[in-house]
Image (tube, coloured by chain):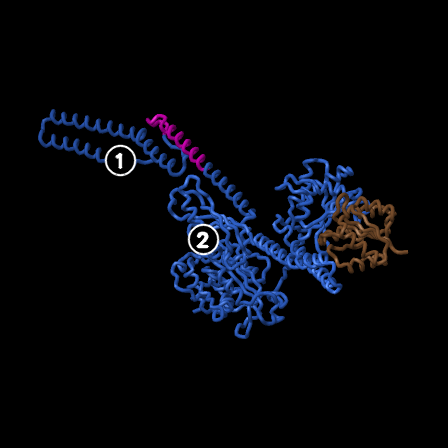
Chain colours: A brown, B blue
Amino acid sequence: MANSILLVDDEPNILLSLEFLMKRAGYVVNTAEDGEVALEKIRDLKPDLVLLDVNMPKKDGFEVCETVRANPDWADIKIIMLTAKGREIEKEKGLALGASDYITKPFATKDVIDRVKAILEA
Amino acid sequence: MSMPDPNKKLLWSLLVVELAIILLGIGGSSVSETGGEVTSKWWVVAGVGLGMLTVQTLAFLYYQHRLLKPIFAIHRGLEIILRTNAAHEVDVSDKSLLGDLPDLLEQLGTELGRNRTEVATALKTGAETTNVQKSQLEKVIEGLKEGVIVCDRNDRITLYNPSAVTILDDHPALGLKRSIFDLLPRTPIEHSLQILHAEEDKVQANKAAGFVCSVVDEEIMLRCHLAYLGEDENLKNERKGFVITFEDVTARQMTRLKRNRLLTSTLQALRGPMANLRAAAENIVTYQDMGAEQRIAFVNIIQEESCRLSAKLDEVEKDSHELVGDDWETTNIYSSDLVRSLARRLSHKGKIEVTMTGVPMWMTVDSHSLIIMLDLLMQHINVHQGVTDFDLEVQIGENTQYLDLAWQGQPLSSSQLSSWRHDELSDVVGKPTVDEILQRMGSEAWSLIHPRLAADAMVRIPLPGSIQQQTEPEVKKLPPRPINYDFSPTSESSDDSEIWNTPLSELNYVVFDTETTGLHIEDGDQVISIAGVRVVNKRILSGEIFDQLVNPGRKIPKESIVFHGITDEMVKDAPEFDEVLPRFHSFVQDSVLVAHNAWFDMKFLRSRAPFTGLRFTNPVLDTLMLSVCVHGTEVDQSLDGIIDRLGIDIFGRHTALGDSMATAKLLLALIEMLEPRGIITLKDAVDSSRELQL
């Protein structure tokens, strides 16, 4: 069965592109537009991987990541952080909080597909 | 006790005259009259005369003893009381006719003595207070972050603080008695002095003038404030001494410059791709009937320009990180001091305690903000989890230092952390939030289970840009350099009679030393290190030093390394001697040059004159020669030998700087020993050295 991916971002334009991209790559795709909706969908859908934007209203990406990691039932869910900031310190923080990888916006679309693939196949 | 001579003479003359009159009377009567009655009458006269004489003598003796002697005693006592001993007891016989005058005199003496003691005590206390105030002032000036330079009315430097040395990057022209204009440009200083002079008569005059200038021969920008020293009315129309305080604004200027450049270049760089993107996208949307080939061309443009924009954004972001936090106030602080300050701050509140763990290390941080931030953080954790005991550890990660605050309990959730991050630091100027401080520091904060202690949780705060190298220089013990005697002339100075007649103890010296690849300049040996220290007013100014490794442009022979410990690796990035010499020349200025076995060092110094055009025409003193003047040639005259003999103790010997320091101490010791031998002035010293050569 195809892997499922949850895309979390508050910008609909990027969701549209990422959804198109991931579907083309053969994954089952769902989307959420803020942190709270993301946690609901994670609970309901148990995706294999979450592409998680850091800067969002309500709950930011770090909080979502932390909540997911705090729940042992969700230990298998992989997380890739997406953010507009390219600061080394934030990468370190994301990884320290349990993300598997980190992608900086703007990104090359091929790069996103490659990393998602690498993490799901690991 | 005896009478002064004139009184004795007076007494004896009086007696003699009276006796003579009586004898004359007796003689005259026996010659002119022969009758018995007459004769007896004259005897009566003589008897009365003699009686009167006796009474007079007795009266005189009585007054001499009771009145004159006591008066003379009082006279002498007064002298003693006035000139030497105020507590002197006036020795007067009890039977004197002077009554209680001697007692009154003694009381006067006692009173005088007490007054004198009081005045002396007041003077001493005054001097002590002045000294305390002076040393407090010195400490204040020393501790100032701003540079301070004080100049006398001849524009010569009379005082400067450690910050001045740091800010001016150890500039060779920074030294006592040096002209300020070798250090800072003349125009702004003179202009400021003129402004202050013109303002002086105004009621609300400006007390200081400000200017920005660059340091002579350096790329250091300073923001300076200049003010007159003191308010001496007598000097109203004369040039006065002045004080310049300054801060380094190079970094700030550079940051501002970089920021402006970044903004300008970003705007320009974005405009192009933006225009291309917009035109292509609008064409596709507006002219939907265009051919497939045309559409693909426009779509390709959109793709290309997006990539260009992306790349440009990455670039800008990278540059902007360098600028964040640049004008943020950071200082160097030892981590244990940071924890101590934090503990002190917490102790006033009395419930939270913090313990330092791990190895202490140096940090470059805004310690004030950091301490308040940590205080707030601990209070949050205390509120959420009731924790009162914390451990604080600073450790080095791959590229950054981490500040880890640990406690027994659970990690903080992001929402708990973010409520802390919205706290205001009310004690900090502008009341920034924790989040803003973290941003300025280029930092973040997150909470985890402690990686080493499972029962503990921690908050980690990375401190980018705080890592410092703190290695102590290695001290090596090396054998001494072999000694050379050479009695060639020690100076080729111009005939400046004032300096030649100046006492040795009042001269300005630069005591220096070189390390070389070998002893034979004619065989191509070169200088590999040169150092010097300034000696002014019999004080070794260890803050005013010159210390420079030199690239000799050749291999350093292995056999010489045992003498100086300098390897090829150490000098490979050092400047060449011809680059170093102008700086040394400017460090030396018009001081008297001093070295041990000076001919050797002077030979290397002077050898480059044809190439650099720099002539060292300063008077030269050789501590070796001076030591021979004092001790003769029989004893060991190597620097080590003399230093051992005189008990001079110096660290870091056998480096150019260590040997300069040792030679400077030796110079001061020799000046002391030469004085009793009649060698007082520079001329005496040079002449004595010359005599040895003959």
> Which residue is located at x 66 percent, y 50 percent?
B363
How far across and how far down the image is residue A34, in percent?
78, 46
How far across and how far down the image is residue B482, in percent?
56, 68
Verify whether residue B111 appears in magenta: yes
Name the amino acid, label 1. Answer: Asn
Mark pair 1, 2: CA separation: 66 Å
Residue furthest to the front: B289
In the picture of the structure, the residue carrying the numbered disc 2 is B156
Name the amino acid, label 2. Answer: Arg
Q: Is residue B36 above or below residue B535?
A: above
Task: State whether the magenta stretch is mostly helix, strand or loop.
Answer: helix
> Which residue is located at x 54 percent, y 44 percent?
B140
In the picture of the structure, the residue carrying the numbered disc 1 is B7
The crowd level at tag 2 (other Cα within 10 Å; few <14, some 14-19, many 20+) is many
In which chain is the residue bearing label 1?
Answer: B
In which chain is the residue bearing label 2?
Answer: B
Q: Quadrant of residue B398?
A: bottom right
Select label 1 or label 2 by which is in front: 2
Looking at marks 1 and 2 on the same chain, the residue that comes earlier in the sequence is marked by: 1
- Nearest the eye: B631 or B399: B399
Range of magenta residues: B93-120
Q: Is residue B444 above or below residue B277?
A: above
Q: Secondary structure at mark 2?
A: loop
State which quarter of the image contains the N terminus of chain B: top left
Residue B560's label in the rendered image is: none
